[in-house]
Amino acid sequence: VDASGTRVFELTAQEGSTELLPGTTTTTWGYNGSHLGPTLRAERGERVTAEVTNHLGEMTTVHWHGMHLPARMDGGPHQPISPGETWRPTWEVDQPAATLWYHPHPHGETERHVYLGLAGMFLIDDPEAAPALPSEYGVDDVPVIVQDKQFSQDGQFSRESVQEPGILGDTVLANGTFGAFHEVTTELVRLRVLNGSTARTYAFGFDDDREFQLVGSDGGLLAAPLPLTRIRLSPGERAEIVVALDPGEDTVLKSYPPELGDVASELAFGGEDTIEVLQLRAAEELQDSEPVPVELAEIEPLAEEEATVTREFTLASRLINGRSMDVDRVDEVVEVGSTEIWEVSTDDPLMHNFHVHDVQFQVLDIDGEAPPPELRGLKDTVYLEPGRRYRLIMRFEDYADPSAAYMYHCHLLRHEDEGLMGQFVVV
Ligand code: C2O
Ligand code: CU
């Protein structure tokens, strides 16, 4: 925190090398280190400034995924950072406590930059609305960035995938570690799980099918904890879960074959893979944890009647509404202060999801039915089961700027790079 009370983060994007597999050195990219980036953390109401320096040999950007902020600070394709330069965005944190993240967004190169290792968590705290959840960072409140990698013969990250959705690696890393484990010392552990993969969708659960409580989605805590045994996360989505352990026991967080809906072939989309992600090893004695509160957050439902505009977005192959991304074209103009409904669907039997910058939306309904309980919180990214119509409601509160665009796109990064993206301005 500097003299004016602003919280300052310094990030330097750089290349390094990491031993990810025993005896093998892999070229990786990271912020302030050789792989991934530090967890950034700020409070609601705080002003933050990031000083992002590019020590890579090529242009990159840093996008604050899930953050409500002015479009000029958003870090999309229009805020390039040339090699050797520093970009200094600043904004006021004005949203509920949440698990957000940051990653590059250079148009056409996002998959490669993220895949090489540029990604980190950005946690928002709200001291005035903090239910008694496990919250000791690294002890009982643990970030889990899940990414799949494919290694070439010589131990480098390979992007030569013939699969349609992009890279489906056979090695899954948690926080950049293969075969990761966490020593649990408390009765309850909160895992902030981020699907930071470029293409793979996971269905997380424990190997003994134990129940866990889903307490948060992309944009913050749920109204109430939701007991589940599986949670599906497509690329970019987050879930905060709380799991209970008994003294001395082990359990493994795994990914099971996810329900992908009506896609062409589950096999081709990674829908049949079971993968170990993170082992939890409980100590012989565990410290007491407070039980998960029955009420977590107040979520003000956005009412359909408030919406003044409805827009339709149909994703097909690499096009949205028949068009490919053009950085010089503004696709949608949104009036500041308005509430809108975005009807999103995909008609081809391919895997897509949908991410909107700047806002957290609520899922009004899917094919006219109420969304499943895990989709009733705040979301910025949602998986699209082929053939179904997702009605998303969102409010564009402030930050009018006709000269700077926000993005919406599929978060399967190869799809995004290949044009499955559009731009909107708030005026
Ligand atoms: Cu996480 Cu536009 O992206
Ligand atoms: Cu897609």
Image (spheres, helix red, strand yellow):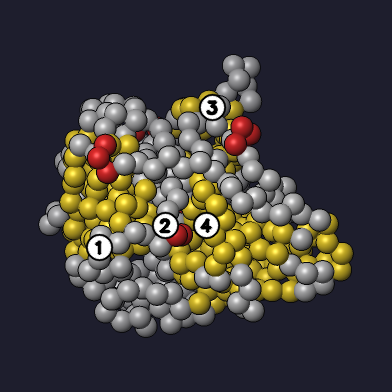
Q: Is residue 228 left or right of residue 210?
A: left
Residue nearest the viewer, comparing 314 with 220: 220
Inspect the image, locate mark 2, and give the three-letter code of the amino acid beneath it. Leu
What's the residue at 42%, 69% (across, down)?
200
Q: Earlier in the sequence, mark 1 or mark 3?
A: 3
Camera-side mark, 2 or 3: 2
Q: Residue at x 77, y 74 (%)?
A: 249
Q: Nearer the viewer, residue 257 or 369?
A: 369
Q: What residue is shown with label 4? A: 239
According to the picture, the residue beneath numbered tag 2 turns out to be 375
Q: Nearer the viewer, mark 1 or mark 3?
A: 1
- Residue at mark 1 to residue at mark 3: CA–CA distance: 37 Å
Residue under pointer 3: 45
Q: N-terminal of the two: label 1 or label 2?
A: 1
- Label annotation for residue 367: 1
Question: Where is residue 36 shown, x and y percent of the image?
Answer: 56, 53
| Label placed on residue 36 | none
Q: On the rendered image, what quadrant is the N terminus found in?
A: top right
Q: Nearer the viewer, mark 4 or mark 1?
A: 1
Secondary structure at numbered mark 1: loop
Looking at marks 4 and 1 on the same chain, the residue that comes earlier in the sequence is marked by 4
Describe the element under mark 2 as helix, strand or loop. helix
- Residue type at mark 4: give it: Ala
Distance from disc 4 to disc 3, alpha carbons, whole Å, reads 23 Å
